[in-house]
Structure formats: C-alpha cells, structure tokens
Image (tube, rainbow, N blue to C red):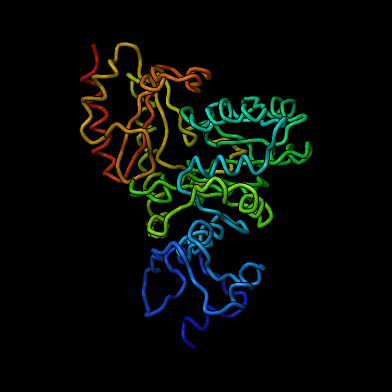
C-alpha cells in the first residue's frame, strides 16, 4: 500500500505540522497552490450559473467573495484553529470591524477588556458610538468585574494576552460566564497564533487574527482572519463583508499559505528566544518591570507556548531616545510578528495626537518598551539590548 493510500483510510489523521506543510493537490503537480489572479470566474452554461446562485455549487463567482486561493487559505486556517469556517480580509482591522458589526447593532452593549489593541479601542470608542453602540472597558483578569459588566451586554471582546502589558484572561471561565449571560464572545488571538492558543476549544465563539503578524511571519502582508462556526461566518458574509468590501487578494492569500508552512517552527523559535530575553531582563538592574506571561505562568492559562512579543520598563535615569537610537539589531516599528526584531517605546504612542488613546486611558507607563523578538541569534539580541541600555544611562 502506498503512503498516500494509507493516509486516505478512515480514522487516519496527520499531525498539525504535516497538515500545514501539505496543501491540497493541484493541477500539473504543483507543490504550491496556484494564484488565481482573476477578478471574475465564468460559467460554461446557464445551469451551472443558476446552481451557483442557488447555493448548490461552490463554483467561484467573483474575487470579492470567493477567490479560490483565498478559499484554500480559509479552509487551512479553519482547520488549524479547530473551527468550522474562516473568512479572510484585507487587514486585521477589517476582520475586527466585520466581526463586531456582525454581532452588535444599534443600542446594544459591548464589554471589552482593558489594554486592547489601540485601533480596536478607537473603533469601539469612536466609530461604534455613531450607531449608539455602547462599550464598557473592564479588567479582563477579574471574573467578578466581567460578571457585573456583562449584564445586558451583547458581545464580550477579549485579547489574551493583551496589548502593551500582556495580561491574560481565563478563557474557559470567561466563556462559561458569558454563556450564562447569553453574551457572544470574541477574541483577538494574534499574540499566541493558532499554534499556542486555540480559544474555540475553551468555548469562545469567534477568533480573530491579524494575519500580518505571525501567520505571515515575513512582514510583507497586511491581512486579517475570522474563525468561527459556519453559522457565525455566514452572518458576516450575508450581512456585513459584501458591503464593506475588505477583501483579501489572491496574491496575499498565497503568501499567507506560504507563512503557515513554517509557522510552528517560527513560533518555537520566538518562544525560546523571547522567554530567554525576558528572563535576562527581569534580573537586570536597569529594568523595573518585565511583562511576559511565561515568567509567572497562570494555572488558568490557555497558552501552550509563548510568542515573541512582551514589554519591559526602563528605570529612571535611562534616556529612552538614546536607548532606541543605540540599538543595532532591533529596529523601531509599530507592528510585530515578523522575522525581524523590533522595539516600540510607549512614549511615542502617549504623545500621539487623537481623541481616543488607550495607552493614556489605561495608564501605560511612559517608561515601557514593547519588544518583538525575531529570529536572530538570542545572544546577539541580548548584547544589543545591553549595549543600548548601558549607553543610555546618565
């Protein structure tokens, strides 16, 4: 019996790494799937077109809704997250906004954890108020606070670990509490990726990814993903996404499929390097605080590993601009999750103009530095941090 024949036998299941590496078989024996760089897909006859519009066929129609390369990405991510269906978007914020608007409507209430991604915060505090959607922000680590806040709410929005301070929520307990209140749960799972956290298994209803981060891994794609049950994804595709138009291109979907093949390997390297650097920084005299969930693991954590993103606070007497300028390997940038190491000083965000600033509203320290650990040698990164810190002392 050939290996491929054995794999097809009922009950045989490949491991996660194998499933990510092997795509569906394609015409002409191509190892990588084709990029369907076409806006339109035609029909060979009248009956096949009618079948598509009746919903009796999965024949591609128009790339705003069902490009075949994008569809393959969606199938693979849904399987990886343990969901029934996935929908891909042209940015993480497109995924977030479409998902939220598919659940809440005018006059309804959202509960959101503190220290959420800044643009999600601005979307809820600003845009959603135009539709009389109220948002209450709470400490996500307090089940009592969540219990009180969820009374009368329609949606609970989570981010675990959260932006800037990397605080976790007890996903199993929160999901159970939300079901008691009849509240839909949604989480931004970009920090952990599907490799290190699977919120649907904990009972969360919808999972969101900024696929620009770890799923891409190469800092060359802007994209977003929503994973949920078929019913919840259908609610987005029927009522929201066709009209907001935040589609993902076939070329970007192909790049994300490429990124998925190495995702487990990259995440293991991010885990190892970042945890090592966090431990070194925690014992360093010039550092007053290190925010990394792996330093003091919670028994209630849903994490199976740790990504490369954490933060630390420099003590008084360390000049932050000098520190940033002295770095040679770490670059300064607003994103994270790629192969390169980055820093983002909180002071730059605290000085950012705008009506809604989550860093200010939630008391982020001006001494805080967010660090994204890439795939460079850990020893080289540690020397770079040490040299920059020592050069910034005064």
Q: Is residue 259 above or below residue 166?
A: below
Q: Quadrant of residue 275?
A: top left
Q: Residue furthest front?
A: 46
Compared with residue 394, is residue 81 higher up or lower down, i.e. above or below?
below
Numbered label tally: 0
Q: Given the current orientation, which residue lies at the most extreme bottom position?
A: 1
Q: Does 4 sit above or below residue 154? A: below
- Residue at image x 67%, y 27%? 132
The percent position of residue 222, horizontal first and vertical second, equals: 40, 46
Can you tell which quarter of the image residue 151 is in? Answer: top right
Q: Position of residue 373 (x, y in %)?
A: 34, 39
Q: Residue at x 44, y 69 (%)?
A: 22
* Relative side of 284 to 239, left or right: left
Q: Is residue 329 left or right of residue 159?
A: left
Q: Is residue 242 left or right of residue 270?
A: right
Quadrant location of the C terminus? top left
Nearer to us in this view, 268 or 107: 107
Q: State the residue at coordinates (52%, 67%).
A: 60
Estimate the x, y position of residue 193 in percent, counting from the top left: 48, 47
Q: Return the x and y of residue 251 as percentages of the image width and height.
A: 38, 58
Viewer-proximal residue, 56 or 32?
56
């Amino acid at each position: 019996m050939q290996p491929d024949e054995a794999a097809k036998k009922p009950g045989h299941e490949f491991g996660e790494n194998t499933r990510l590496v092997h795509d569906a078989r394609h015409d002409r024996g191509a190892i990588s799937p084709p990029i369907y760089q076409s806006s339109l897909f035609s029909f060979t006859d009248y009956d096949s077109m009618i079948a598509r519009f009746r919903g009796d066929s999965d024949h591609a129609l128009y790339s705003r809704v069902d490009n075949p390369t994008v569809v393959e990405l969606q199938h693979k991510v849904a399987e990886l997250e343990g969901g029934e269906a996935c929908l891909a978007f042209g940015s993480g914020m497109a995924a977030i906004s479409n998902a939220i608007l598919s659940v809440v409507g005018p006059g309804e209430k959202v509960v959101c954890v503190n220290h959420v991604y800044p643009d999600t915060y601005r979307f809820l505090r600003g845009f959603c108020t135009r539709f009389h959607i109220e948002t209450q922000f709470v400490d996500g680590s307090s089940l009592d606070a969540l219990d009180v806040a969820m009374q009368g709410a329609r949606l609970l929005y989570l981010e675990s670990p959260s932006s800037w301070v990397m605080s976790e929520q007890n996903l199993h307990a929160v999901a159970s509490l939300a079901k008691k209140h009849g509240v839909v749960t949604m989480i931004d799972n970009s920090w952990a990726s599907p490799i290190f956290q699977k919120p649907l298994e904990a009972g969360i209803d919808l999972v969101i990814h900024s696929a620009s981060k770890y799923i891409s891994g190469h800092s060359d794609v802007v994209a977003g993903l929503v994973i949920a049950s078929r019913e919840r994804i259908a609610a987005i595709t029927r009522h929201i996404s066709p009209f907001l138009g935040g589609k993902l291109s076939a070329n970007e979907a192909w790049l994300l499929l490429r990124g998925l093949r190495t995702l487990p390997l990259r995440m293991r390297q991010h885990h190892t390097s970042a945890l090592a650097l966090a431990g070194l920084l925690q014992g360093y005299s010039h550092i007053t605080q290190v925010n990394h969930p792996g330093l003091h693991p919670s028994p209630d954590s849903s994490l199976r590993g740790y990504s490369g993103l954490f933060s630390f606070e420099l003590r008084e007497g360390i000049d932050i601009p000098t520190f940033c300028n002295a770095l040679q390997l770490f670059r300064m940038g607003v994103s994270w999750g790629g192969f390169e190491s980055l820093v983002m000083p909180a002071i730059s965000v605290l000085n950012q103009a705008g009506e809604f600033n989550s860093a200010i509203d939630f008391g982020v320290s001006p001494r805080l530095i967010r660090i994204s650990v890439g795939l460079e040698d850990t020893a080289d990164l540690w020397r770079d941090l040490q040299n920059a810190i020592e050069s910034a002392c005064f």
